Image (cartoon, rainbow, N blue to C red):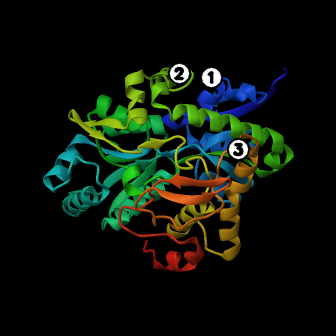
């Protein structure tokens, strides 16, 4: 069988795993695709090369297609995100010196976002200089969730702390060199910061906003429209990869595959915490993080439009775009649950009937209506107890304080 070549950009991050497995385990080939994965060094490169058409699609930060569609990038083209590449996966790591001060201020080593944030606020108020935190890209979940966590903890981003952008693999080095005091990044670069630079993982995405998206499959809208069958096959291939990755019996093999030089080029023991959820957070302290990364369960690959709108609300909050009804509609339409559902019809896979939900409402695993019956999705709470109702977007935006 002749395979159709597809080129995809990715960064050396753990949550490239579903694309890597789609290639290496033959799921893409089974859908008639020869998947070529091109490793990049920064999200800016992914952003620009995707807009220029150098890639057919790419691993993208979840807000990145939204920013492209809204024209926020130097090179912008309307994009869509028809699939999420799992849930969770990032964390906040700080230097040993900063952690020592936070621990003195009452920060527990349990990764709980509330108490850790409260301790950091005490340190910020008493510190002799403004602390500096790194994030991987301006329009990233890392930037928005870090800012959300800081703000809800009583720390005003940009006024009380500085936030700078660096590519993910550079963040541990910057921490070790003293250029930054902490950073928010996806795995394995928090674990690398602990093992190589003596850092301490302070909290994680799974504690700030539970079961929330971090990366998506992103592509130009025009290419997707012209290649709808390829898009559907890609979704099915990644679906099979996600299902395979979700089986604990496959975790060791997944880590070994990712450790290859063309992918993460790191030892398996640095990669495996993302799969097991058991992290050395610093100084040999081990903490287990439930649902640290969710590749498949609980509709983990479903692109909820409400999550697109939450990211949009943060773009508005931090002055990146002026709010309007048209922009909100465009942001929501970037995530495409309809394309995802349609692709999985031949497999009989249950998918949520609704396109949107109230984010932060679920405290426990909950059944939702799905094609062919029901399915269970995980708790989705924000650490401060707030909820985001996309039907009340205007009020939510108005209530946010910069």
Please report contact status of discs 3 and 1: CB closer than 8 Å, yes or no. no
Residue found 31% across the figure and 56% down from its top: 113
Residue found 43% across the figure and 37% down from its top: 187
Badge 1 marks a residue whose secondary structure is helix
Q: Earlier in the sequence, mark 3 or mark 1?
A: 1
Mark-to-mark CA distance, 3 and 1: 24 Å
Q: Quadrant of the C terminus?
A: bottom left
Say which residue label 1 marks.
Answer: 24
Say which residue label 2 marks.
Answer: 257
Please report contact status of discs 1 and 2: CB closer than 8 Å, yes or no. yes
Assess disc 3: are there few (<14), some (14-19) or many (≥20) residues with their C-alpha within 10 Å of its C-alpha: few
**382 left or right of 120?**
right
Q: Quadrant of residue 400?
A: bottom left
Say which residue label 3 marks.
Answer: 348
Mark-to-mark CA distance, 1 and 2: 8 Å
Residue 371, visible in the rendered structure: yes
Assess disc 1: are there few (<14), some (14-19) or many (≥20) residues with their C-alpha within 10 Å of its C-alpha: some
Q: Nearer the viewer, residue 67 or 355?
A: 355
Residue 344, image x and y in percent? 72, 44
Residue 306, image x and y in percent? 59, 64
**251 left or right of 199?**
right
Q: Nearer the viewer, residue 312 or 240?
A: 240
Q: Quadrant of residue 8?
A: top right
Q: Nearer the viewer, residue 109 or 58?
A: 109
Q: In the displayed structure, would residue 400 be above or below residue 211?
A: below
Q: Which mark is residue 138?
A: none
Q: In the displayed structure, would residue 152 be above or below residue 245?
A: below
């Amino acid at each position: 069988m002749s395979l159709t070549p597809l080129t995809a950009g990715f960064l050396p991050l753990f949550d490239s795993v579903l694309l890597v497995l789609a290639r290496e385990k033959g799921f893409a080939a089974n859908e008639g695709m020869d998947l070529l994965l091109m490793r990049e060094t920064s999200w800016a490169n992914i952003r620009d090369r995707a807009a220029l058409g150098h890639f057919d699609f790419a691993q993208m930060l979840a807000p990145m297609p939204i920013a492209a569609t809204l024209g926020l990038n130097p090179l912008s083209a309307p994009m869509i995100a028809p699939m999420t590449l799992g849930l969770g996966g990032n964390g906040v790591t700080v230097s040993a010196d900063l952690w020592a001060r936070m621990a003195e201020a009452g920060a527990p080593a349990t990764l709980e976002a509330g108490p850790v944030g409260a301790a950091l606020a005490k340190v910020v108020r008493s510190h002799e200089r403004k602390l500096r935190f790194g994030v991987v890209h301006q329009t990233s979940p890392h930037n928005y969730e870090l800012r959300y966590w800081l703000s809800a903890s009583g720390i005003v981003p940009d006024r009380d702390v500085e936030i700078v952008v660096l590519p993910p693999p550079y963040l541990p080095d910057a921490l070790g060199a003293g250029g930054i005091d902490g950073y928010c990044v996806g795995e394995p670069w928090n674990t690398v910061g602990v093992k190589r630079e003596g850092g301490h993982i302070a909290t994680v995405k799974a504690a700030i906003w539970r079961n929330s998206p971090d990366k998506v499959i992103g592509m130009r809208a025009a290419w997707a429209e012209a290649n709808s069958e390829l898009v559907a096959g890609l979704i099915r291939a990644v679906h099979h990869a996600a299902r395979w990755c979700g089986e604990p019996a496959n975790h060791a093999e997944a880590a070994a595959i990712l450790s290859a030089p063309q992918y993460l080029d790191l030892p398996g023991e640095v990669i495996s915490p993302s799969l097991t959820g058991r992290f050395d957070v610093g100084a040999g302290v081990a903490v287990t993080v439930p649902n640290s990364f969710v590749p498949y369960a609980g509709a983990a690959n479903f692109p909820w439009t409400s999550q697109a709108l939450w990211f949009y609300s943060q773009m508005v909050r931090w002055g990146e775009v002026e709010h309007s009804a048209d922009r909100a509609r465009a942001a929501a339409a970037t995530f495409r649950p309809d394309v995802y559902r349609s692709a999985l019809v031949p497999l009989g896979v249950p998918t949520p009937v609704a396109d949107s939900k109230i984010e932060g409402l679920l405290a426990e695993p909950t059944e939702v209506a799905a094609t062919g019956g029901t399915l269970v999705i995980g708790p989705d709470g924000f650490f401060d107890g707030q909820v985001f109702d996309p039907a009340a977007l205007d009020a939510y935006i108005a209530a946010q304080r910069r």
